[in-house]
């Protein structure tokens, strides 16, 4: 696992990160690691796996046409 050194971080940013870590019951390092992993986003393989899970979950289901529901809602009289 690689290490990262961040130089020149403002004191108030560090204080906010420490406060955030405390709220989340994490160490400062764990909090920053979590933030970096979220910011990096999922890999293409993770995105494909997510869509595959959705396809399996909703396979065979039919959903109403939302355009028709919106049209009906717009045609209702406002009291």
Image (cartoon, rainbow, N blue to C red):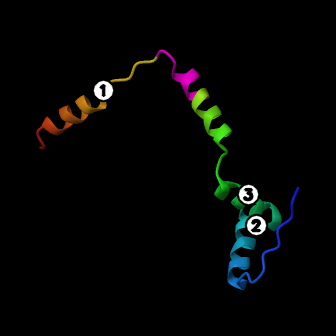
Q: Main secondary structure of the magenta part?
A: helix
- Dividing the image into 4 quarters, which one contains the C terminus? top left
| Image location of residue 55, percent across then percent down | 55, 24
Rounded to the nearest angstrom, the CA distance separating label 1 from label 2 is: 46 Å
Q: Quadrant of residue 75?
A: top left
Q: Earlier in the sequence, mark 3 or mark 2?
A: 2
Outermost residue on the front side: it is: 44
Label 2: few (<14), some or many (≥20) within 10 Å? few
Question: Which stretch did the figure color magenta?
Answer: 53-60
Q: Can residue 21 be seen by looking at this rendering?
A: yes
Q: Secondary structure at mark 2?
A: helix
For image coordinates 67% across by 39% down, the residue present is: 46
Q: Secondary structure at mark 1?
A: loop
For image coordinates 78% across by 75% down, the residue present is: 6
Q: Which residue is mark 2?
A: 22
| 15 or 34: nearer the viewer | 34
63 w.r.t. 31: above or below: above
Q: Is residue 55 magenta?
A: yes
Rounded to the nearest angstrom, the CA distance separating label 3 from label 1 is: 39 Å
Q: Earlier in the sequence, mark 1 or mark 2?
A: 2
- Image marks 3 and 2: residues in contact by CB distance under 8 Å: no
| Image location of residue 68, percent across then percent down | 23, 29
- Image marks 1 and 2: residues in contact by CB distance under 8 Å: no
The label number, if any, that marks residue 34 in the structure image: 3
The label number, if any, that marks residue 65 in the structure image: 1
Rounded to the nearest angstrom, the CA distance separating label 3 from label 2 is: 14 Å
């Amino acid at each position: 696992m690689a290490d990262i050194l961040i130089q020149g971080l403002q004191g108030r940013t560090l204080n906010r990160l420490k406060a955030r870590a405390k709220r989340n019951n994490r160490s400062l390092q764990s909090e920053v690691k979590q933030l970096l992993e979220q910011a990096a986003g999922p890999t293409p393989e993770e995105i494909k796996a997510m869509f595959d899970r959705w396809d399996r979950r909703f396979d065979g289901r039919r959903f109403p046409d939302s355009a028709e529901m919106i049209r009906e809602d717009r045609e209702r009289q406002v009291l």
